[in-house]
């Protein structure tokens, strides 16, 4: 029965559905055809799916779920379609609607920020439910950006009074004194990615106002020493470059009414030889403490250009081979 020829007809309910489902030059339909191993024919306001019964039924479930989502004028990107296909193929299509309808925050340009993968959804829910969350995984998985969106949401909802963003300026080490300008100018290059994300979410004018009122603080990790941070949403980015001592110092700054999100990629440690990463160590020290959650991302969660996933996988294969055989001559 699973291999018998079959067809399914789906009526497209609105122009939004057409735009979202088809994609530019029908690229979404072509991708679904290839991945689900079906033939898709469009006839006016109808989609006809042809193929073996098992594949047709899966594709039919996919389109129905995607139509539910695109009713709400949610613009489905190529990545969204690709990820939804993976969810259906793995039997997790029930996750699609809750995933794409969880609006974390809206940017100054009116763009809705939502989790785009199951790991991102788990991460967002973990931040809602825990006071300390670690987001660990490769670049491009949305760890820092989503944490900032959650921070802005908390600030707007008056759950916290301020947002503090920090990073270790590890590449500078003790060389900050040799850089031109005052201390803020010296550390700004290390904090620039945090500023860029805030500009995107808030817009330049709103960002400046929040900074002037002290509602947002962007500072190197060294500035955290000796402080107790109450009623704050604190994000420590690039945490793989903290030492054990720095990680302990940061985590013990947490005051009443505060949340901390710590993000990092343990494959990208830039610490000097002989220094152990605080992010690597903390996973075993704090793994069983209630109220602390570790969320892990992999290449499937990369939401940048589709080639970035392939690049990450290629490097992982190369590094694994190098471990097994030694470096190339």
Image (spheres, rainbow, N blue to C red):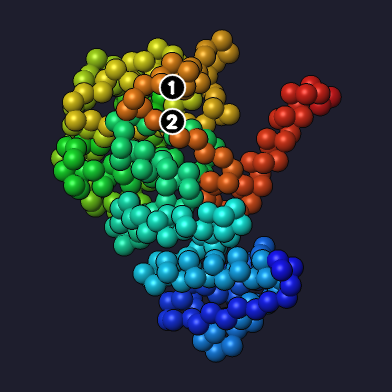
Check the image and name the residue furthest to the top.
274
In the rendered structure, which disc, 1 or 2, sits on the residue that comes first in sequence? 1
* Residue 80 in view in this figure: yes
Q: Position of residue 263 (x, y in %)?
A: 43, 32
Residue nearest the viewer, comparing 55 with 161? 55
Q: Position of residue 261 (x, y in %)?
A: 35, 32
* Residue 196 in view in this figure: no
Q: Position of residue 66 (x, y in %)?
A: 48, 67
Q: Which residue is pictured at 33% across the width and 46% down the height?
A: 149
Quarter occupied by residue 214: top left
Q: Which residue is pictured at 48% across the width and 25% down the height?
A: 240
Check the image and name the residue furthest to the bottom.
44
Secondary structure under badge 2? Answer: strand
Q: Which residue is mark 2?
A: 294
Q: Which residue is mark 1?
A: 287
Secondary structure under badge 1? Answer: loop
What is the crowding at mark 1: few (fewer than 14 residues within 10 Å), some, or many (at least 20)? Answer: few
Q: Which residue is pictured at 60% across the width and 75% down the height?
A: 26
Residue nearest the viewer, comparing 283 with 217? 283
**Are the two marked residues, 1 and 2, in contact with CB atoms closer than 8 angstroms?**
yes
Residue nearest the viewer, comparing 8 with 261? 8
Image quadrant containing the N terminus: bottom right
Check the image and name the residue furthest to the front.
1
Image quadrant containing the C terminus: top right
What is the crowding at mark 2: few (fewer than 14 residues within 10 Å), some, or many (at least 20)? Answer: some
Q: Which residue is pictured at 64% across the width and 51% down the height?
A: 307
């Amino acid at each position: 029965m699973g291999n018998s020829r079959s067809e399914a007809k789906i009526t497209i309910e609105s122009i939004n559905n057409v735009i979202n489902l088809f994609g530019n030059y029908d690229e979404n339909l072509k991708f679904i055809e290839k991945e689900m191993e079906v033939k898709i024919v469009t006839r006016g306001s109808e989609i006809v799916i042809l193929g073996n019964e098992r594949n047709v039924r899966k594709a039919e479930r996919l389109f129905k779920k995607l139509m539910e989502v695109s009713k709400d004028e949610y613009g489905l990107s190529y990545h969204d379609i690709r990820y939804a296909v993976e969810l259906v193929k793995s039997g997790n299509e029930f996750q699609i609607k809750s995933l794409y309808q969880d609006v974390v925050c809206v940017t100054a340009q009116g763009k809705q920020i939502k989790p785009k993968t199951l790991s991102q959804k788990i991460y967002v829910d973990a931040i809602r439910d825990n006071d300390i969350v670690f987001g660990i995984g490769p670049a491009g998985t949305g760890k820092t950006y989503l944490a900032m969106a959650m921070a802005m949401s908390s600030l707007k909802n008056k759950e916290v009074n301020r947002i503090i963003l920090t990073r270790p300026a590890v590449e500078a080490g003790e060389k900050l004194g040799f850089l031109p300008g005052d201390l803020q100018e010296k550390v700004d290059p290390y904090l620039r990615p945090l500023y860029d994300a805030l500009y995107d979410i808030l817009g330049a004018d709103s960002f400046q106002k929040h900074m002037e009122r002290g509602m947002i603080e962007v500072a190197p990790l060294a500035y955290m020493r000796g402080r107790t941070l109450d009623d704050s949403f604190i994000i420590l980015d690039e945490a793989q470059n903290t030492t054990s001592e720095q990680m302990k110092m940061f985590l013990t700054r947490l005051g009443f009414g505060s949340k901390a999100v710590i993000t990092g990629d343990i494959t990208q440690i830039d610490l000097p030889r002989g220094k152990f990463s605080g992010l690597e160590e903390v996973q075993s020290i704090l793994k069983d403490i209630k109220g602390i959650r570790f969320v892990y991302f992999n290449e499937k969660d990369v939401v940048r250009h589709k080639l970035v996933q392939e690049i990450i996988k290629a490097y992982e294969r190369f590094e694994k081979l190098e471990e097994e055989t030694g470096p190339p001559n």
